[in-house]
Image (cartoon, coloured by chain):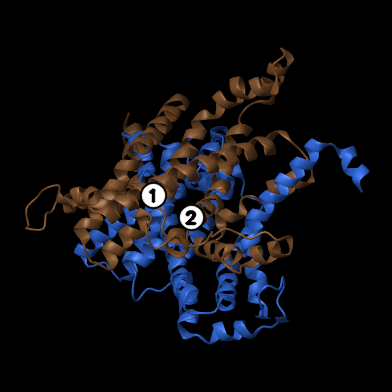
Chain colours: A blue, B brown
Amino acid sequence: MLWYFRGIGKRKIVEFVLLAAFILFFAGPLLNLVVLAFSGQWAYPDLLPNQWSLRWWRFVFQQDDVVQSIGLSFLIASIVTVLSIVICIPAAYAFARLRFPFKRMFLFSFLLTHAFPKMGLYVSIAVLFYKLGLMDTLLGVILIHMINVLMFMTWIPTASFRSVHAAQEESARDVGASPFRVFRSITLPMAMPGILVASIFTFLNSLDEAQGTFLVGMPNYKTMPIIMYSIITDFPSSAGAVFSIILTAPTILLLLLSQRFVSADVMSSGFQVK
Amino acid sequence: MIKGRKEAVLGLIMVSPAFLLLLIIVVLPIVQTFVVSLHSEDGGYDLSRYAFLFTDRLMRMNIVFTLKVTVISSLLVLLVSYAMALFMSFSSGKLVDLIRKTYMIPLFIPGVIATYGLINLLGNHGWLSRMLLPLGIALPRLIFDEKGIVIANLWFNIPFTTMLLTSALAGIPASVIESAKDIGAGRLSVFLRVIFPLSYKTFLVALTFVFMSVIGSFTAPYLLGPNSPQMLGVSMQQVFGIFREQEQAAAMAVFTFLLCSVLGYFYIRSMAKDEAARM
């Protein structure tokens, strides 16, 4: 065994250990939850559960507010996604293709959503919502979810529209396609990966949003992450682990489906000029 | 000429819904909060809510604690992320490939879940302490402690920062690095003279994001931080939600804006410059 390691060289071993530590650091907490969710009994200091069981899954699905929160979360996330597509995609197209006054100022104004620390911004919004009577309303919760997504929902599609070569659009025009037809058959399909990534990111972002909802939506709008806050303090850790998996499942599913399109380049175009 | 005007009107119309939304949910609240924070207890206007931040002992402790956690977290995140981004860009191997494929997953994991996982993993009698027990190693107190918050910050921010830096490094042409090597530059000087200067802007953007996300964080410090001192995000929520002191919460919010204002300003300006360069 030892000669094998010596053959690889010290640098390689150090590299291997560091990379493995990196992976374990990120995978550890999630793996722990998976094990917990299927454990029936897990006494200290045993390394693995003494008994495996699905008992906590039944328990979690019997809680009424848990089941309700799942429906509510998906409803809110869908509304937020549709609304932000309707509002942001036209703006993105305009930023990429049209000339209009103050274009740069408009484009950069979206940076404001990321130029303030989140909790401070949420408290500011809560102060305003309190005055407007938007506390504890569906509209209030949806608006607070839109803050996080406004920027990349505009910027990622802007970058995608820009990457469609004008020459392709022009040649379609030359053979007689109407402007709308060009948009539908050339521009939109080519910009689709970026729009898709932005939409999925929006959906997940809304599904996972906890802090703002906690501040603005209490006590009636208990989405999944909010329920999670109380599960963590009130229930045994296995119940929390089960709910964690339920809350993470849509994320994993959507990620697997969109894996082809999600890349560091596309994603980071939502946060900086490239 | 007329075509140009039509285009201008169309552009403005297409942008206006998104811009209006931005005004309502970002600009208006910030202005309003600033005004509210100046309300004094007797109905007039003064800076008493801000003075409280520095005269109250607990509040002062919270501020110092927040700054300390933020600085430590930002440094560690940038260090690890830069190293990781460099490694992924210029190395190969099975493990690196695995990381390249998976490192973005934490970006999509709900913050509450990751925090909960960390509590279970690192807590008293948690999985890690069970694993280390046979080796005779006892873990220090991590959860409900400042270390726990820093660890959670690393978990949340390293993937995002690595993503930004990786995409910046990918923009550096291999030929530039090759030619630097050809004229005899060592690894270190390639990094200092070529790679860093070409990516330092993204480096600063990344710093801005980490700094702000830590100062404005709530979930992790709320669930796994100590009861006192608190991070400002948690303290703000309590002042607003439990003590119902809107004016005080507003002053705290404005204070966190001020803490981040330099970086925020820099971020917007540097983006604007880049955009100007490419338009």
Image side of residue A127 versus residue B3, left or right: left
- Which SS class for mark 2? helix
Can residue A52 be seen from the camera position used here?
Answer: yes
- Residue A12 sits in quarter: top right
The 10 Å Cα crowd at callout 2, few under 14, some 14 to 19, many 20 or more, is many
**Residue B217 location in percent, x, y?**
42, 54
- Figure quadrant of the N terminus of chain B: top left
Image height of B164 relative to B113, above or below? above
The amino acid sitting under disc 1 is: Thr
Q: Which residue is mark 2?
A: B149
The amino acid sitting under disc 2 is: Ile
- Which SS class for mark 1? helix
Image side of residue B97 versus residue B151, left or right: right
The 10 Å Cα crowd at callout 1, few under 14, some 14 to 19, many 20 or more, is many
Seen at 70% across and 45% down, the residue is A18
Q: Nearer the viewer, residue B212 or B165?
A: B212
Q: Which residue is mark 1?
A: B66
Seen at 35% across and 44% down, the residue is A112
Q: Nearer the viewer, residue B149 or B97?
A: B149
Chain under numbered label 1:
B
Seen at 35% across and 32% down, the residue is B4
- Figure quadrant of the C terminus of chain B: top left
Can residue B97 be seen from the camera position used here?
Answer: no
- Cα–Cα gap, marks 1 and 2: 10 Å
Of mark 1 and mark 2, the one earlier in the sequence is 1
Q: Nearer the viewer, residue B10 or B80?
A: B80
**Residue A7 location in percent, x, y?**
90, 38
Chain under numbered label 2:
B
